[in-house]
Amino acid sequence: MTQIKSTSIKSTLIKSTPIKNTNGNPIPAAIKEQLIQIVTQKRYLDQVEELACYAYDAFWEEAMPDAVIFPKTAEEVSRILKIASLHKIPITGRGAGTSLCSASVPVKHGIVLCFSKMDKIIEINTRDRYIIVQPGVINGDVQKALAPFGFFYPPDPGSMNIATIGGNIAQNAGGPRCLKYGVTMDYVLGMEVVLASGEIVGFGSRNVKDVTGYKLSSLFCGSEGTLGLVTQAILKVVPLPETAKTLMVTFKDLDDSANAVSDIIGSGILPAAMELMDKFTLNAIEDSFGLGLDREAEGSLLIEIDGIKEACEKEMGKIIEKLKENNAVHIQESTNDADRERLWTARRSAYGVFAKMAPNIVSEDVTVPVSQVPEMTRRIKQIAKHYGLTAGVLAHAGDGNMHPMIPADKSNEEEWARVEKAFDEIFAAAADLGGTLSGEHGIGLAKARYLPLVMNQDSINLMARIKQAIDPDNILNPGKFV
Amino acid sequence: MSTPIKPLKNCGKCGLCLSACPVYKVLKEEQASPRARLQLIKAFENNTLKSSALLKEIISKCLMCGSCAVACPSGINHYEKFMDMREKMVKDFGETPAIRSLIYLLARESRIRRGAGMARLGQKLVQKLTPTWLANKYCLGNIPLKQLPQLNLLPFRKTVATTTPAQGTQRGSLVYFTGCATNYMYADTGISMVGILTHLGYEVIIPSDQTCCGIPLMFHGAVDEAVKNMITNIEALGAHECDGILVDCTTCGAALKDEYPALIKKRMAQDPQNPPESWKKLASAAQKIADKTTDILSFIVAHKQDLVFDKTNPNLGNIAYHAPCHSRNSFNTLALVQSLLKELPFMNYTPTLDEAECCGGGGTFFYEHPKIAKKMMDKKIHHVKAVKAKIWLTDCPVCRINLAGNIDKTSETEDIQVLHPVTLIHDALKKEPVKEGPVKKS
């Protein structure tokens, strides 16, 4: 493998300006009064103790807003944006603040529009297979509302029990079962959006088939609040599978585990999830939870298939065959729900296990073609070792979505510099293998500077032109990737 | 909490605690979340945020239920952080007169006793003199006055002997920490506790010099008073040789099991002036008590094969359960209790959708933040009605006050009785003494 020199990477990247968590300018009294008239005093915050609670999300950068407003209707959002446009006040949308790329941090200060109180489910229609929600509805609450009807909404980000649909749409969120079912964008049938000008626009419909004009919902999905603010969404829902089966498999060789993934997918089976964990991660989980995992295994896979019972059984046989062909050491099948839950607990606790190791946990989500998962894993390990760091590797292996995790302490400047260099190289390695910067977290502030690794200048310029056309004053989530 | 104490800087701000926080789920405002409180405490400790009345309000808008600490992947002990911060805030800004008088009351057993006596008189007087419309209108927090529990005629501990012998052959002896609620309000719980434990072949000792566990004092920053109560209790409970210390309230239990050792550790680190020997002794006595402390429902689960039920009792019908925060988070009993209730022969356990969701009682939370508590309660009432339960069980007296206080007793369709699970279990036991006592365990 040819390691790219970190100096040459540096010259390719966009120079980033450090973010300072200082106060901006207070909203002038006259404007404040107009805003309060729209939402009442109760839904307008500007005391420092309150503002400090909206200066962060799950990324480490922080910046204070000048005011926080909780809108309840699209009309309120529209009136607020008209005022903001007139006075060029930055507006940053926020749901539950679980972004891993700093998408909801108001780096240019101004107003945080928090959609958490706009949390009504407007309509559930399983005959036509859709649900209409306000942006502040929590993903997990959508699942709870659909379950009695025998339906579910597939995108399942790790934060699904608190993250909002608005945030999911803004970040085009994914999750483990997106391997089979697809990501947020595949489930947004239509949306209502308020533009920077205050215009309320809508596109898409209740229909799965809809080729009426540009598919603008795809443009806004993943736009990270830089083009408009979603005030309502029509989401496609699907029937809950009749049954689910889970396997935990270990391998002596990491290559074997990754090859098993491509073999299974190549054989025509599409599992709901295929989660890869390396030896370091597996041992870290075992240290914390003692679940009886194989400590000697270099790699492990958590595979879940779902569907009709008979089909699952048939597929399971085929999967086990492929696993054996790839030298699987232990194959453990869940026999009941409690067993299945236990295996998933192991996988889900991975983040927590790393979070306990150090004050910060840098968890990125580079994505590579499935066949490159073993090579990418090796490069991550090599790069981390080169900088004297420890990296755990988790991957939604079935779709090549990798989560290199490096525990570190941001207050240790020397160590942090090494972490940054390591990630420069990890992103470059992903690009080198035909991969991309982010599979499901988004670009935000975290990865803005790496864009040139995967896009040419003309493509970056095109994004800027789209932004310019829709938000000419650059008031929506300024200071991020576009 | 059982999670190890980790430095605050380990908070990765992931937001998982928001999904566990009952207050956040009602208000949907970040400043009402555990993550925000940690960030504010961090800013306060780094001197980037000054202490203020608003900061105190934000910090105290919390049930202290501990659910956030259980959900935290970084293993942060929110509970302890919040308790420390409350103490600092109270020092700077004081408490409301109502809370101050509560602290005054709970800091001395004699005051609690007098207070309860007067309150009982007051209650009678209020009932006699207050027109119904007025009694309906006035509330303590989110609870209408007429729906508050009647106080015990006499404190429970005055009505039982210090030592009640086992029925049948004695297999061991247990110390029972009654807590204030059983002593002054819910004697039915106390009677059933003694009944069940003696039925199981245990002698029950109720030390007469025990007092309030001190948790309400700690929550309101009155740590010095809490330390005094703690010392009284350690001496009272430590004076008896026993095989276990039983609580009917998991909040009191959390004090004995988690808070006392933690408080002593903190005091010893803080105050090197004190003679270390006496504190070391106190620490070891507290640890002994902590190791022996069990909540009654876990104890019953461990002994359920020895319970002899009277099979002639009629089935009590649909019964729901509400899991108190400290039972879930400090004693981790949810799954245990669910399995116990399923097995009890004299009732149909009908779980509600949200049986593990907080009711908003939270010590004095229902009084300080009635609107938030009411919203939590409304959901719970809705769900308990949906399963057509006639009895609602809970193993925490504050939850019991809050649940019962929000059921409209005057409405026939709504009348649901709220009880501690021990009451039903005790009522269902075969009444004559068990002839052949269970074999004493080695």
Image (spheres, helix red, strand yellow):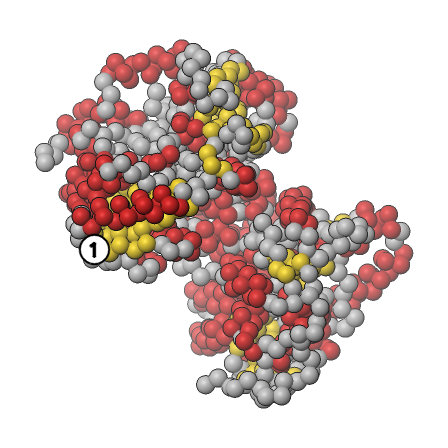
Residue depicted at x 23% and y 18%: A456
Q: Position of residue A415 (x, y in %)?
A: 24, 43
- The reply, left or right, for residue B417 in relation to residue A318 is right
Q: Residue furthest left?
A: A2
Q: At 58% across and 57% down in the image, what residue appears? A: B323
- Mark 1, chain letter? A
On screen, residue A333 versus residue B435, left or right, reads left
Viewport quadrant of the C terminus of chain B: bottom left
Q: Is residue A400 visible?
A: yes
Q: Is residue A156 left or right of residue B222?
A: left
Q: Residue at x 37, y 23 (%)?
A: A479
Residue on which disc 1 sits: A329
Viewer-side residue, A177 vs A418: A177
> Is B327 situated above or below B133?
below
Q: Work out whether A343 lies above or below A68.
A: below
| x and y, in percent, of residue A79 in the image | 57, 17
Q: Is residue B108 visible?
A: no
**Callout 1, which amino acid?**
Val
